Image (spheres, coloured by chain):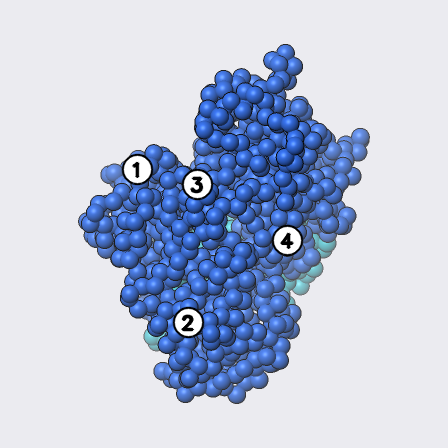
Amino acid sequence: MERPAPTLPPTLPSQFQDWFAAKGWAARDHQIAMVQRAKAGRHVLLIAPTGGGKTLAGFLPSLIDLSQTPASERAESIHTLYVSPLKALAVDVARNLMAPIEEMGLPIRVESRTGDTNLSKRQRQKANPPDILLTTPEQLALFCAWDGARAYFANLKTVIIDEVHALHGSKRGDLLCLGLARLQSFSPAMRRVGLSATVEDPERLRRWIAPRPEVADLVLGTPGAAPRIEVLLSDQRVPWAGHSAQHAMAEVYETLKTAQTALVFVNTRWQSEFAFQELWRLNEDNLPIALHHGALAPEQRRKVEAAMARGELRAVVCTSTLDLGIDWGGVDLVIQLAAPKGSSRLVQRIGRSNHRLDEPSRALLVPANRFEMLECQAALEAVAAGALDGDPPRTGALDVLAQHLMGACCGEGLSSEALFAEARSAAPYEDMTQRDFDDVLSFVSDGGYALRTYDQFRRIVKGQDGLWCVRNPQTAQRHRLNVGAIVAAATLNIRVSSGRHGGGRKIGEAEEWYFEQLTPGDTFLFGGEVWRFEGVSGMDARVTRSGDKEPKIPSWGGTKFSMSSHLAERVRDMIMDRDHWQQLPGDVQDWLGAQAAHSAIPAADGLLVETFPRGGKSYLVCYPFEGRLAHTTLAMLLTRRLDRLGVAPLGFVCNDYVLCIWAMKPMDGLDLNDLFQQDMLGDDLEAWLDDSVMLKRLFRHCALISGLIERRFAGAEKSGRQVTFSSDLIYDVLRKHQPDHLLLRCARADAAEGMLDIRRLGDFLQRIVGKIEGISLPKVSPFAVPVMMEIGREAIAGAAQEAILEDAAFDLISEALS
Amino acid sequence: MTPEDKLPVRLACGSVRLKVNGEAVILRRSGALWLEQHQTLVVADLHLEKGSAYAARGQMLPPYDTAETLRRLDGEVAALGPRRLILLGDSLHDGQAEARLAAINVDQIEQLAKGLELLWVAGNHDADGPRHLPGQTIDEMTIGQLILRHEPHPAPQPGEVSGHLHPCAKVIGKGRSVRRRCFATDGQRLILPAFGAYAGGLNLRDAAFSPLFAKPPIAAALGKDQVHLIGWNQLVADRLTLAAPRH
């Protein structure tokens, strides 16, 4: 814990002390500490809960420095760069920063620069740099690819990275970290400042923010009072299955009335639409309740944010888009609908409420079904114990490095030694091998193919001076058009149709796949209203207002987060420990008791596998509690094995807790140790991965991020469609002809870490060796009921694609051909 | 002709046999057309050296498409032993593609040409045909009840077998969509899928196809092990459009 010694002379200049006094504030310890670190020229990580004056703490040293530098000594360049993951945040901080600047009359220019900033303003910023520039990681990546960047940032004193906890563990974080290394090269004396919420492992972030092998200093803000969290014990029976917490909405509404302003968090956009509609149905007191999620049009979101800031709203139903960002002092209650999935996420969400630090934040968890009840209880206890879940270790993605190297060479000529050293100074890449780096550089240059036919087409070339540089300005322009680590699904604009031709107000965006399911005439919920889908033309999904109260298309269930392994462990322990059951509501206790009587309680460190017949089919249900992603992978692999064993598996369904497979033949006689053998992660996984849609999708992301294929093309607006080359075609060819190609390695690495949770699955299979308990039952067990109820909602059979083609075969063909 | 003669038949190897303009044809899972009676194998739209064409413009697609396409073609020739091989146009991706071919690929083509008659139908990308590779360049050819050309002529053309449009079939099932290359036929004319490894595809529901068929065509989609016959009503467009054709 870093604290200033009490005998130090005052750190703040009198002008600033007066300002604090005039506001009736005392400068906090951590704000003083930040000023001291700056004087000592140290890189620093500040960990503080929201509302602790964190942003001001980050900027204070820069404001002081600028205020004390006479105009004659001021360089005409950026003094401080601030980077935040959200566009809105950058704009909002600009506004908040103006308060002390204006009130003290400081001669400091602050501007923001995001993807929304118009061209003329961006050009002005380059020609006439402000003192403080607030921006996003993508803009930084663009700067790195600009040949004027070295001069522009030559005098950069400080870079502030906000919301570090949210950025560091992702490809976006990798790219940002490399960007910081580039900036450090432009301005070697540059100091780095990281601002973060409370995390499980501060050491990791201290290393991430610093130029390696250095480590940043740590400053801790005062932790707030412990949050008051309750789990809603509904008078209604906790449902067996479901994701929507519908049973408890009336109670949620009553709770809203007791708060000044509440945030109602849900895990998916569609859940937010549903919850919003439900609350308004119950809203007899006509409370102003708003909706905020990522698909709504930006103007709509700005309106809600502004109304929040003015204290005009009683509640906002929102998704993770509001997890980060601006603090609003008026929020005094956070309601989490359905399980939070992780204690860190829960703590950060609770942190949104009540920014008078000395008072405890209030939070209410509303589980949507019985298993979630267990999860919510576990989350509550985890938070009380201060046990946060951490992120698994990760190394920097090589496709991201490829994009970064290309950008660097667009900006200036660089030797491969310099590029290698610079990349290794970024924490995610500090252990990168020379071989991997050489592969990436080779890839950037000519695609990295064993067949050496592309020498004449290189994108970057090594000059006489030994420096790598972009081939020509056109290549650089194409790179800049495609910069960014975020790869989103193809989205359509949702536009209110006004007549048959074009025009119409855009109300938001949604992924293309959603509209593939709809036929014209279907109604769905968006922005709190029911719309009628008319069809798609170009990039727009056309809609008209529907008079219906109820949408025909139900909300898309499920969450995108898996329950964290820490929470999973707690839930398992909780189930095993009968004394613990008394914390749970009556009907959940009864349910646990029934499971003990009819089957068995899953052992905390083992695996329970039940088999039973039902409706002419055989079921195998097991309870790994390892999260939906790992379960899906496990199910795919088990299905292959069961297929080879001849039991004819038909399908499976899984959620964060349970996995259920059904088949034609009984599965009770199977050797479970064999079935769950770890070697399934060997050949079986390779074979399945190679074929899987999942890996192709990951490969597509890698192909786009690395710059192999382009998404945006110059002049695309005028010439109409210029299509992104199909990555599936590339994947098939590459697999056959160069299976160890860099991008295939990238896709597999992503699979291991992310979407397939293979690492977690591997740990699980290791853990249960010799501890599998099989029970053959005459009928479905109480624990199996919830997952059985989900069958029919999203059954995915193994060889899905071929089966879909087969199903579509049409027996009126002869008629068609006659 | 009995009613059975009209039905498509699924063969053991996964191919489908049906009739176009009364002529029996076999649609292979590889996307090739096998005219067994005439011992003629037909493939369309190889687009050799498409990968290198993109590399020249800055997108470094793996340079293995030519090798892969020729490997597949080799496989079909070895399996069927045709007397005549017809490349139905756009065999080379552009006018400089022939020059970009690696020596090993040129050898492959020369080997292919031995022991059979090799014919290159002129396409729009390679209008003049190859300059140095073996085989003869022609505009179109009549075989039995069929007339083979690269680009389909407008208005119904009984017996026409063509390529050029790279048809694809898209179906939705179990909440997901699947898109595959396909043959397209209404029993009168037939359009071949593109054979080339990097050749893209145009959805059969696209407006470009509608003037060609008098009644809605069926798709013969290329699956992993077999050809799947799919009726018009099961097909969906890439984007649901306001002006979706109704049949």
Residue at numbered disc 4: A394
Disc 3 designates what residue? A356
Instruction: In the picture, one chain is blue; tell me its letter.
Output: A
Report x, y in % for residue A677.
Answer: 62, 76
Quarter of the figure that contains the N terminus of chain A = top right
Q: Which chain is cyan?
A: B
**Quick one: label 2, few (<14), some, or many (20+) residues within 10 Å?**
few
Residue for badge 2? A582
Disc nearest the viewer among 2 and 1: 2
Q: Earlier in the sequence, mark 2 or mark 1?
A: 1
| Amino acid type for the residue under numbered disc 2 | Gln
- Earlier along the polypeptide chain: callout 3 or callout 1? 1
- How far is the residue under mark 3 from the one under mark 1? 19 Å
Q: Is residue A44 above or below residue A518?
A: above
Q: Amino acid at mark 4?
A: Arg
Left or right: A621, with A307 as reference point:
right
Q: Secondary structure at mark 1?
A: loop
Q: Nearer the viewer, mark 3 or mark 4?
A: 3
Query: Element under label 3?
Result: loop
Subunit of label 4:
A
**Considering depth in this image, is A763 or A283 the residue closer to the camera?**
A283
Residue B234 visible? The answer is: no
Residue shown at 70%/39% (left/top)?
A: A211
Circle number at residue A312: 1
Label 1: chain letter: A
Three-letter residue code for mark 3: Arg
Q: Is residue A20 visible?
A: yes
